[in-house]
Amino acid sequence: MEARDYSATETLRDGRSVEIRTLRPEDRASLLASVGRTSKQSLYRRFFSFRSGFTEQEVNLYLDVDFVSHVALVAVLKEHGQPKIVGEARYVVVRPGQAEVAFAVDDPHQGHGIGTALLRHLVALARQAGLKEFIADVLPENAVMLRVFETSGLGIRTRRESDAIHVVLQLS
């Protein structure tokens, strides 16, 4: 399946179904609503700085996905009969064979396996694209993200740096 048309259904730990699919331009409002449900602490863990919001330019950058060098997936749950974006993950190719990966799950939906599901699907797309490894910088206190990486079944190397843990995940 082409990355730009990707869609799959997963069952979460609590038995609910979540759709993992590509980010679409029309997801703007739902993606911003998800950010609005994300605590300052969770946003800090994702962006390494406290954020009170995003500029129009930043929002456009996150939505400008070419599905070659920048791939983004969202996790969509049905709540009260309406689809709701509750998480997102993306990779950006930084050099041939290697991409930086990042995740965010809104606070009310953390702990249900959404990050793990997003990683699994990003890995499948990255392998299909010929990537060999993901890299990420993770704050040391972000134990949940580190655990997602450690339990992914992928080869993992970590290196402690001054303010972060540098993670390398082997995709092949």
Image (cartoon, rainbow, N blue to C red):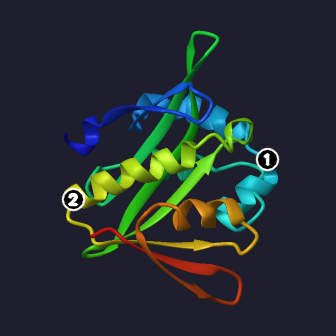
Q: Amino acid at mark 1?
A: Ser
Residue ID for mark 1: 39
In the image, 35 versus 20, the foreground residue is 20
Q: Residue at image x 21%, y 59%?
A: 129
Location of residue 144 in the rendering, given as x and y in whole percent from the top left corner: 67, 59
Location of residue 121 in the rendering, given as x and y in whole percent from the top left corner: 37, 47
Query: In which quadrant of the rendered image does the N terminus lie?
Result: top left
Location of residue 63 in the rendering, given as x and y in whole percent from the top left corner: 45, 44
Horizontal side of 51 relative to 165 (left or right) equals: right
Marker count (numbered): 2
84 up-or-down from 42: above or below: above
Query: In which quadrant of the rendered image does the C terminus lie?
Result: bottom left
In the image, 44 versus 120, the foreground residue is 120
Residue ID for mark 2: 129
Horizontal side of 105 relative to 20 (left or right) equals: right
Q: Amino acid at mark 2?
A: Ala
Q: Residue at image x 80%, y 52%?
A: 40
